[in-house]
Image: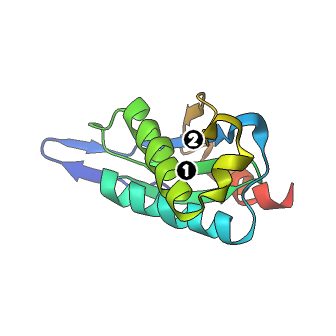
């Protein structure tokens, strides 16, 4: 169950399911690169004041279940996750740029859905089974 937080004069529990894909759906998340991406995303979440409850990658996409504050603006959070992760991953693995035409890591679109108490467990299971698909 999602955590309930207290702010000054308000109480909240906000979760989002985020998904975005590698440009051209290239399969790049295997082994060390997958592990590095997960570490990078955890670091970005910490910097943004967001908590990642669940995270998994397919070979060509990322799934996150995040908790955030009411002050967070989802497009800004996604922009930070995608932009900063691309820069950091390219810095660590410059050979990836040559595999991706134009040197862009992420497709510009993304999926976001709010998560309720009724759907949270289903979404957690869906995210954790991404490697098996």
Disc 1 to disc 2, how far (Cα)? 6 Å
How packed mark 1 is, by other alpha carbons closer than 10 Å (few <14, some 14-19, many 20 or more), is many
Q: Is label 1 in contact with label 2 (beta carbons under 8 Å)?
A: yes
Q: Is residue 34 left or right of residue 51?
A: right
Q: Secondary structure at mark 2?
A: strand
> Which residue is farthest right?
133
Q: Please say which color scheme the image uses.
A: rainbow
> Which residue is farthest left?
8
> Which residue carries the number 1 mark?
65
Q: Secondary structure at mark 1?
A: strand
How packed mark 2 is, by other alpha carbons closer than 10 Å (few <14, some 14-19, many 20 or more), is some
Q: Compare marks 1 and 2 and give the one earlier in the sequence.
A: 2
Q: Nearer the viewer, residue 91 or 29?
A: 91
How many callouts does the rendering have?
A: 2
Picture residue at 58% right of the left edge, 29% below the top? 108
Residue 69 x %, y %? 31, 44
Residue 88 x %, y %? 48, 57
Q: Tell me, yes or no, if residue 80 can be seen here.
A: yes
Return the mark for residue 54: none
Q: Nearer the viewer, residue 17 or 92?
A: 92
Residue 3 x %, y %? 40, 56
Q: Is residue 122 left or right of residue 50?
A: right
Residue 109 x %, y %? 60, 27
> Which residue carries the number 2 mark?
18
Q: Nearer the viewer, residue 71 or 122?
A: 71
Picture residue at 29% right of the left edge, 53% below the top? 5
Q: Tell me, yes or no, if residue 123 can be seen here.
A: no
Picture residue at 50% right of the left edge, 59% below the top? 91
Quadrant in the picture for residue 132 = bottom right
- Image quadrant for the C terminus? bottom right
């Amino acid at each position: 169950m999602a955590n309930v937080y207290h702010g000054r004069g308000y109480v909240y529990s906000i979760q989002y399911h985020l998904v975005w894909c590698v440009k051209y759906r290239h399969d790049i998340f295997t082994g060390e690169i997958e592990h590095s991406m997960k570490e990078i995303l955890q670091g970005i979440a910490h910097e943004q004041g967001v908590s990642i409850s669940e995270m998994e990658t397919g070979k060509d996409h990322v799934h996150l279940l995040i908790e955030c504050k009411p002050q967070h603006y989802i497009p800004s959070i996604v922009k930070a996750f995608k932009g900063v992760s691309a820069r950091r991953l390219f810095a660590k693995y410059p050979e990836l740029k040559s595999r991706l035409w134009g040197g862009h890591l992420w497709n510009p679109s993304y999926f976001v859905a709010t998560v309720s108490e009724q759907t949270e467990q289903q979404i957690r299971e869906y995210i954790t089974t991404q490697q098996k698909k």
